[in-house]
Image (cartoon, grey):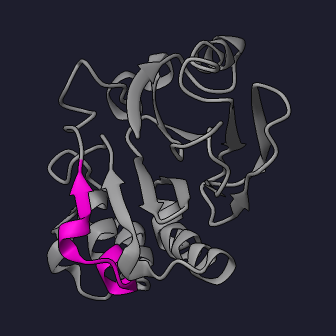
Amino acid sequence: MAFAIGPPCGGGRAADRLAAIVDEFVTAIRTCRQVHGAVVHHAGDTTGPVLEVGDGDGLVTTTPGLGIAVWTADCVPVLLRGPGVVAAVHAGWRGCAADVVGAAVRQIASRHGCPPGELTAALGPAVCGGCYEVGPGVCRALRDVDPDETRWRDRDRVDLRGFLAARLEALGLAPDRVETVGGCTAESTELASYRRDGSAAGRQWSLVVLTGEK
């Protein structure tokens, strides 16, 4: 699993940055055209160094050496690992409300035979609850997925990583298998934050790859 900072996604510089690690760490890299939904793709083809697989907010692979990556700048990057399978998920509040992590966990279980209890999750750098002020509509949408707000809401502020940790545990992951990695994007100038920097913000990219023969 790797977390790094790069230019805004969608441009040539972003693809160049990812392409630079091909051959050093991985055979190829797959990303999604992120749309804040709950579509999770299976990635297995290693033709071409860096390719988008289509609209979606998650990728799953069982192919050793194939890196899968998501881009974030306040949203939560979620990396999942189980025996013979890994996943990368982009989860903003809309993705949380659409239960994108649930879609990934269910796909891993149904398609790849890995139960949730065998998964480990890393929740990467994201805006913290103290900095993430939202309207009542966001809270209502999240409450439809997790009615117990004690882990993720403090009045008009929402902790998306707290929400996702609670959701992953509800899906069957053990609490000691869910780890928070990195600080608050809005507070740390070393991290990319759209909330802080607007259109000038870079992006965190978060990548996971199965070890073994490429």
Q: How many labels does the image show?
A: 0
Observer able to see residue 53: yes
Residue 208 sits above or below residue 39 on the image: above
Residue 134 sits above or below residue 108 on the image: above
Write down the region rendered in magenta. Answer: 167-180
Residue 150, x across and y down, in percent:
15, 79
Residue 106 sits above or below residue 74 on the image: below
Horizontally, residue 66 falls left or right of residue 25, namely right
Question: Residue at coordinates 78% horizontally, 33% vertically from top-left?
Answer: 51
Residue 189, x across and y down, in percent:
23, 19
* Magenta-drawn stretch contains 175: yes
Residue 18 lies in quadrant: top right
Q: Which residue lies furthest to the right in this view?
A: 47
Q: In which quarter of the image is the N terminus?
A: top left
Which sits in the foreground, 6 or 29? 29
Q: Quadrant of the C terminus?
A: top right
Which sits in the foreground, 19 or 198? 19
Residue 202 sits above or below residue 98 on the image: above
Horizontally, residue 133 falls left or right of residue 136, namely left
Horizontally, residue 104 falls left or right of residue 72, namely right
* Magenta-drawn stretch contains 171: yes
Residue 144, x across and y down, in percent:
43, 85
